[in-house]
Image: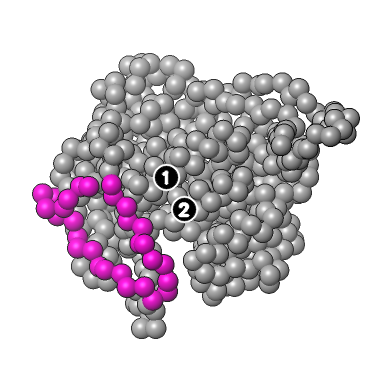
């Protein structure tokens, strides 16, 4: 069987500038040649899945219908024309129906009228992701708690879907390496993958990072990354009717296998910016942290509320990283700083005004799919940033220096082997450096 795609995608170079490759086969010329081919058998790739195929309607499906998922739908429909959301899947029916109703109540017809999720396209259960992917959509939006990301992403790429993928891309080393394998395949298939690391679509960050990498502040000598914010807690109490796994999902931010701790779930934004500016990931890290105020109970789980880390890149440059989630009227700071031999930058001070963040990342995605903009695939770079964050967490938990080689060979796999609403889940103790075992 011969498989032909119409047109060849553009790729981006290290400065995120398009290297345009000509499109030798147009859609019309392909149809003419395939008709003339006589006995040859062709598997025709759907026009919506290739670049340069025009403005055909794109259909999207959402996996994970929570607050982040429903907002991603709004951002997608705000940022791109001729796109509809036609399928949704979630582990919990009440979550799906509540947030679908929220979307359908939107006062803007451009949002409300393009959410076309009929009853037979609403899927519930831990296997709902498979049904969304198989529902005839072109774009899969992954917005579940992060622990599920490697499983869902792998399935979407196997089905040759374009993906909007919320960050982070996993919560343990085994899962992120699984994601990386699928990321490589997505590049080979020229699928578009846009991450929820939305600074990569920010009109201030994108040109600034390009200029830093072109030498605007000289050689980078040091970097700093901060997410100093408040706590994130989903639930105040457990419903006695909820089984263990249901409770873990309802209270996902307090459970390591689903959230990855703050350094992975939130602080990734800042660490990813520094990796992006450096054009590389660190090679080792030493870190410390703990729980200064989080009670040792079922609601708060066993994650830290502060972590500080000293990352080192292959060229000897250090990144000082600090994240915390303290209550009350305390100091706040979410930022990045890169210091060079000729100056310094907050990583967004050399950009301009224009489209920013959450909406524009979806515009970039749809433009990449249709060929109206440069080809975008952020899967591998943001996967490396995710693993960087996990490396920092494991260094804080264990008290060890953790290297990139160690994390790339780690056997840590937090994903439960069984999934069901009443599956029994053990409560993990708060990690104690010197006692916690890195695997």
Q: Which element carries disc 2, helix, strand or loop?
A: helix
Q: What is the quadrant of residue 27 in the picture?
A: top right
Question: How much space separates mark 1 and mark 2, taking CA atoms?
Answer: 8 Å
Image quarter hosting the N terminus = top right
Q: Which element carries disc 1, helix, strand or loop?
A: helix
Is residue 21 covered in magenta? Answer: no
Q: How many marks?
A: 2
Q: Nearer the viewer, residue 91 or 266?
A: 91
Which residue is painted at 67% across and 32% down in the image? 373
Number of the label disc, if any, that sits on residue 151: 2
Number of the label disc, if any, that sits on residue 178: 1
Res 183 visible: yes
The spot of residue 82 in percent (x, y) is 76, 49
Which residue is painted at 55% across and 42% down in the image? 194
Residue furthest left as drawn: 434
Instruction: Look at the picture and state if 401 lies above or below 140.
Output: above
Q: Which residues are magenta?
A: 411-439
Q: Are marks 1 and 2 in contact (CB under 8 Å)?
A: yes
Is residue 435 covered in magenta? Answer: yes
The spot of residue 191 in percent (x, y) is 60, 38
Which residue is painted at 64% across and 49% down in the image? 139
């Amino acid at each position: 069987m011969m498989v032909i795609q119409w047109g060849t995608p553009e790729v981006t170079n290290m400065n995120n500038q398009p290297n345009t490759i000509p499109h030798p086969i147009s859609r019309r010329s392909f149809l003419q040649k395939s008709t003339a081919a006589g006995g040859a058998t062709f598997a025709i790739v759907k026009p919506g899945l290739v670049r340069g195929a025009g403005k055909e309607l794109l259909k999207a499906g959402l996996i994970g219908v929570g607050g982040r998922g429903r907002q991603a739908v709004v951002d997608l429909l705000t940022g791109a024309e001729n796109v509809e959301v036609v399928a949704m899947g979630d582990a919990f029916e009440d979550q799906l129906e509540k947030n679908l109703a929220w979307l359908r109540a939107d006062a803007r017809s451009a949002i409300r009228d393009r959410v076309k999720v009929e009853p037979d396209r609403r899927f519930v259960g831990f296997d709902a992701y498979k049904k969304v992917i198989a529902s005839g959509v072109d774009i899969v939006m992954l917005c579940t708690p992060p622990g599920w990301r490697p499983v869902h992403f792998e399935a979407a790429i196997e089905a040759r879907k374009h993906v909007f993928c919320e960050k982070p891309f996993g919560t343990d080393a085994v899962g992120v390496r699984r994601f990386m394998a699928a990321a490589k395949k997505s590049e080979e298939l020229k699928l578009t993958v846009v991450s929820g690391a939305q600074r990569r679509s920010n009109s201030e960050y994108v040109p600034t990072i390009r200029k830093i990498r072109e030498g605007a502040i000289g050689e980078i000598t040091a970097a700093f990354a901060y997410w100093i914010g408040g706590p994130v807690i989903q639930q105040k109490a457990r419903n006695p009717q909820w089984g263990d796994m249901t409770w873990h999902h309802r209270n996902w931010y307090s459970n390591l296998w689903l959230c990855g701790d703050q350094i992975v779930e939130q602080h990734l934004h800042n660490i990813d910016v520094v990796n992006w500016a450096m054009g590389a990931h660190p090679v080792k890290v030493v870190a410390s942290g703990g729980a200064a105020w989080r009670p040792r109970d079922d609601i708060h789980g066993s994650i830290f509320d502060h972590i500080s880390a000293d990352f080192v890149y292959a060229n000897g440059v250090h990144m000082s990283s600090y994240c915390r989630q303290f209550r009350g009227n305390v100091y706040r700071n979410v930022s990045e700083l890169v210091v060079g031999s000729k100056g310094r930058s907050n990583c967004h001070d050399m950009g301009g005004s224009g489209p920013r963040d959450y909406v524009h990342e979806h515009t970039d995605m749809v433009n990449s799919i249709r060929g109206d903009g440069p080809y975008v695939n952020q899967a591998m770079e943001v996967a490396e940033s995710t693993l960087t964050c996990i490396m920092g967490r494991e260094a804080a938990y264990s008290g060890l220096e953790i290297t990139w080689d160690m994390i790339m060979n780690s056997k840590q796999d937090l994903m439960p082997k069984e999934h069901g609403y009443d599956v029994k889940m053990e409560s993990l103790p708060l990690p104690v450096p010197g006692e916690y075992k890195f695997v």
